[in-house]
Amino acid sequence: MEVSFDSPEQEKVYGMGLQYTEMNFKGKKVHMITSEGGVGRGLQPITDMGNTERKNMGGNTMTTYAPSYSFVTSLRRGFIYNNHTEIGHIDFSQSARRFSTLMW
C-alpha cells in the first residue's frame, strides 16, 4: 500500500512513534521496524566511534523501539494507520513538496 501527500516546503512533520533524537522528520526516510538504538543514536562523536570500532554499534538517529505509522504536521494535518504489524517506511525525503508511506 502506498499513500502520497502534497506538502508545502515549510511544513514540519512530527511523530513516528517513540523517537529519541529526531523531532522534525521532513527531508528524512523513517523505517518502521523495531531496532536497537545503539550507543549514541547519531550523536557525535560517540556514534562515529561506536560505528568504527564495533561494527555499527553506534546506531543512528532514526532507530526506535516503538515505531508508529502516525504523524502530525505544523499545518495541522495528520495520518494514523492503525495496523502496527507491517514493515515499511514513511519517506519525507522524496522532494520538498511530497511525501509517501509504503507498507508491505
Image (tube, rainbow, N blue to C red):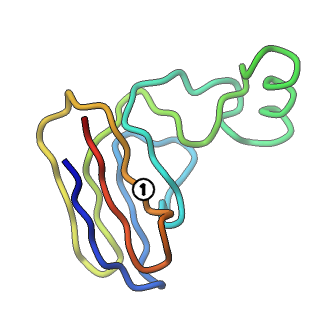
Q: Nearer the viewer, residue 33 or 103?
A: 103
Q: Residue at 47% across / 65% down in the picture?
A: 94
Q: Nearer the viewer, residue 43 or 34?
A: 34
The residue sitting at the top extreme is: 54
Side of 59 relative to 37 (left or right): right
Q: Secondary structure at mark 1?
A: strand
Q: Is residue 49 above or below residue 16?
A: above
Side of 14 relative to 25 (left or right): left
Q: Residue at 39% across / 61% down in the picture?
A: 14
Q: Residue at 53% across / 57% down in the picture?
A: 28
Q: Is residue 68 above or below residue 80?
A: above
Residue bearing the label numbered 1: 91
Side of 49 relative to 75 (left or right): right
Count of residue discs: 1
Hey, what amino acid is under mark 1?
Asp
Badge 1 crowding class, 10 Å Cα cut-off, few under 14, some 14 to 19, many 20 or more, is many
Place residue 104 in its image quadrant.
Answer: top left
Place residue 53 in its image quadrant.
Answer: top right
Give the percent coordinates (x, y) of residue 84: 19, 33
Q: Is residue 77 above or below residue 52?
A: below
Give the percent coordinates (x, y) of residue 9: 47, 84
The residue sitting at the left extreme is: 82
Q: Nearer the viewer, residue 10 or 74?
A: 10
Q: Residue at 35% across / 36% down in the picture?
A: 67
Give the percent coordinates (x, y) of residue 40: 71, 32
